[in-house]
Image: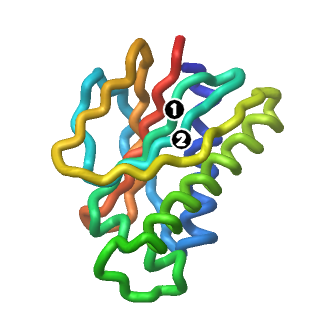
Amino acid sequence: MNVEYINPFIEASRAVLKQIAGIDVKLGSISLKNSPYASDNIVILVGLTGKIRGQAIFSMNKNVALTAASGMMGGLNLTELDEMSKSALSELTNMILGNTATLLYNRGVGVEITPPSFLMGENMQISPSKMKTICIPLLLGEDKKIELDISVVD
C-alpha cells in the first residue's frame, strides 16, 4: 500500500474522534500484520472500493467502545453497549472513513466506502484473504486503544 494513503486515515481518525467524541488520540507504532490475527471483542468493518480496494477494520475492547460512545453522547455514562451505542460507534467509523475518502479524493485518489458492519464476540480472528494489513494503533490514554487495520489488495 502506498504510504501516502495511510496519512488520511490517521488525520481523519484523530480529527473525528476529537471533534465528535471529545477524545484526544496519539498515534502508536504502525506495523504490518500477518493473516490471520486476533482481534479485540468489538470490530467495525467498512469496505473500500475504487483506487484502494480492501477494508478498514476498527477493533477495540468493550471499555474503549463505551468510552467512545459515551463521548459521542455528550459524556453520558454508559455501562452497556445497547443498540443506540452500537449505532453511534458505527456512525463514528462512517464519519472517520467518509472524511478519509474526502482527504484521499482531494489528493487525486478516488475511494468509496460501504456501510459499516458491527461485530461483537469473543476470540475473534480476522483473516483478510490475499491482502496486506497495516495496523494503525490509535491511543486514547491509559491502556485504551482502537486498532485501525487497513487491509488492501495489491
Hey, which quadrant is residue 101 in on the image? top right
Q: Amino acid at mark 1?
A: Gln
Q: Which residue corresponds to the image point at 44% horizontal and 57% vertical from the top-left? A: 26
The image position of residue 23, as x and y in percent, is: 49, 70
Q: Are marks 1 and 2 in contact (CB under 8 Å)?
A: yes
Q: Which residue corresponds to the image point at 25% horizontal and 25% vertical from the top-left? A: 36
Q: Is residue 140 above or below residue 44?
A: below
What element does badge 1 sit on? Answer: strand
Disc 2 designates what residue? 46
Q: Is residue 108 left or right of residue 29?
A: right
Q: Is residue 52 left or right of residue 45?
A: right
- Colouring scheme applied when the structure was drawn: rainbow
Q: Residue furthest front?
A: 83
User: Can you say which quadrant of the picture contains the N terminus?
Assistant: top right
Q: Is residue 38 above or below residue 64?
A: above
Disc 1 designates what residue? 55
Q: Which residue corresponds to the image point at 59% horizontal and 20% vertical from the top-left? A: 2
Q: Which residue corresponds to the image point at 17% horizontal and 44% vertical from the top-left? A: 123
**Closer to us: 49 or 139:** 49
**Closer to us: 138 or 40:** 40
**Closer to us: 26 or 150:** 150
Q: Is residue 123 left or right of residue 31?
A: left
The numbered mark, 1 or 2, whose residue comes first in the sequence reads 2
Disc 1 crowd, CA 10 A, few/some/many (<14, 14-19, 20+) = many
